[in-house]
Image (tube, rainbow, N blue to C red):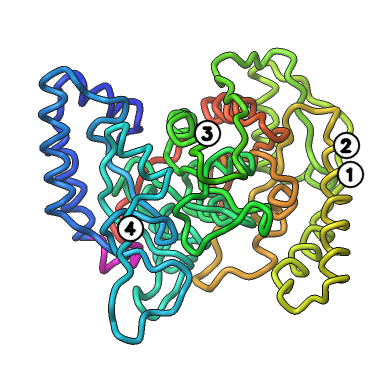
Amino acid sequence: MQTVESLVRDLRSGRVSATEVVGGLVERLGMLRPVMGAVAAIDPERSLREAAAADHRLRAGDGRPLEGVAFTVKDWIDVADWPVSGAVPADPSGEERRPAADATAVARLRAAGAIVVAISTTMADSAKHGRTRNPRDLSRAPGGSSSGAAALVAAGVAPMALGSDSGGSIRLPAAWCGVAGLKPTFGRVPLTGHFPRCGSLEDGRTVIGPLALAVTDLATILKVIAGPDGKDAGVPPVPLGDPHDVEMSGLRVGVIAGTEDDVPTMRALGAAADAGAVVVPKALPDVRDEALELTRRHWGRAKLSGAEHVALLWDWDRFRRRLLMATAEVDVLIAPATHGPAPLWRESVESDYQWTLPWSLTGAPVVVVPTGTQDGLPVAVQVIAHPWQDHIALAAARHIQARLPQITTVTPGG
């Protein structure tokens, strides 16, 4: 599977056609769907019609930035007239939910020329779609809840995907499936069309973000989907910086106390130093237990009294302020993405998210970067920057990825 960047070059040069690319992906989807359980819906005829239209534009010299590039969409993000069920039980009548309009992020990608080839599964097991499996090893867990999104990129079914992340739902699957993933700053990408709805005042954690093979592709996708849409009041007009404007020389990089013996973290830290970053010797506090406790209270907020809910919000604010102040001495923090490689198949449990939860609570941008393998399975780190500094996280992650072993796509069971 090519990266988005290389595929765009080939499509524009005429080396390949969108019809050829999408046709091959549709065929691969059909072959792998029963093996992986990562596909909630496909519409080959529609995808191929859009590919033919993309070829017409490309031949006419009217190709848009992502003309002919395929992507998948998590089954919580609306795609017009596609079956999108969200995290709700199936309708007893059997009637499918087919949104009338695209989510803002989907609409922006399609306006840039990208083509939806599948709706990807959420969570790892469902009565409707069965068990989603990790393409690196079908006996392993893919992580959730953007399970299918990560699995399909890793399996070479699509070069990019849209997922969503509240506590690690992009980052955990990306790490276990061996792909790159971005949790943007909270409020960077509109949640318009995320189903079920997530209000910025009610939640404060959920974001829509991309997954891809290369960190450079994440930056390309974010540039398309970011910014206010006039509907989501939680998205302010904060300019998005360019990762290419970030100099690694002198960039301050730190780690969390207790991770000095974590091989992926030290491998990524070494790569950052090789790129010119300055390693800050001070290790930052480990706040995983506190983050988990706050998140449990947030998950159970429906049972809280008014006073208890106010106390939760104050505690959350204090946690966020304290962690942001503790990280003020660094520009980028490198932390484990998970406890280790994907375990044998099981549903995700609370402890899987202990490394990801703190940065959901602060709203910070986080890039997951594969750093190699352990026991033949992918391992990864999180590259974390300050809120609204998405371009710095992406720049550091790009340099780290360029200096570490590359993980390619895989054919499950092949």
| Percent x, y of residue 66 | 30, 30
Q: Residue at x 11, y 22 (%)?
A: 59
Label 1 sits on residue = 322
> In the rendered structure, are the residues bearing label 4 and label 2 in contact, judged by CB atoms less than 8 Å apart?
no
Instruction: Determine which of the numbered discs, if any, sits on residue 119 in the image.
Output: 4
Between 285 and 312, the residue placed more toward the observer is: 312
**Main SS type for the magenta part?**
helix
| Percent x, y of residue 270 | 68, 28
Residue 327: image quadrant is: top right
376 horizontally vs 160: left or right: right
Q: Mark 4 Cα within 10 Å, few/some/many (few <14, many 20+)?
A: many
- Disc 1, SS: helix
Label 2 sits on residue = 325
Magenta segment: 32-39
Label 3 sits on residue = 227
Q: Earlier in the sequence, mark 4 or mark 3?
A: 4
Q: CA distance from mark 1 to mark 3?
A: 28 Å
Establish if 314 lies above or below 109: below
* Amino acid type assigned to the residue bearing label 1 in the image: Arg
Q: CA distance from mark 4 to mark 3?
A: 24 Å
* Amino acid type assigned to the residue bearing label 2 in the image: Met
Q: Residue at x 28, y 47 (%)?
A: 116
* Amino acid type assigned to the residue bearing label 3 in the image: Gly
> In the rendered structure, are the residues bearing label 2 and label 1 in contact, judged by CB atoms less than 8 Å apart?
yes
Q: CA distance from mark 2 to mark 1?
A: 5 Å
- Callout in the foreground (2, 3): 3
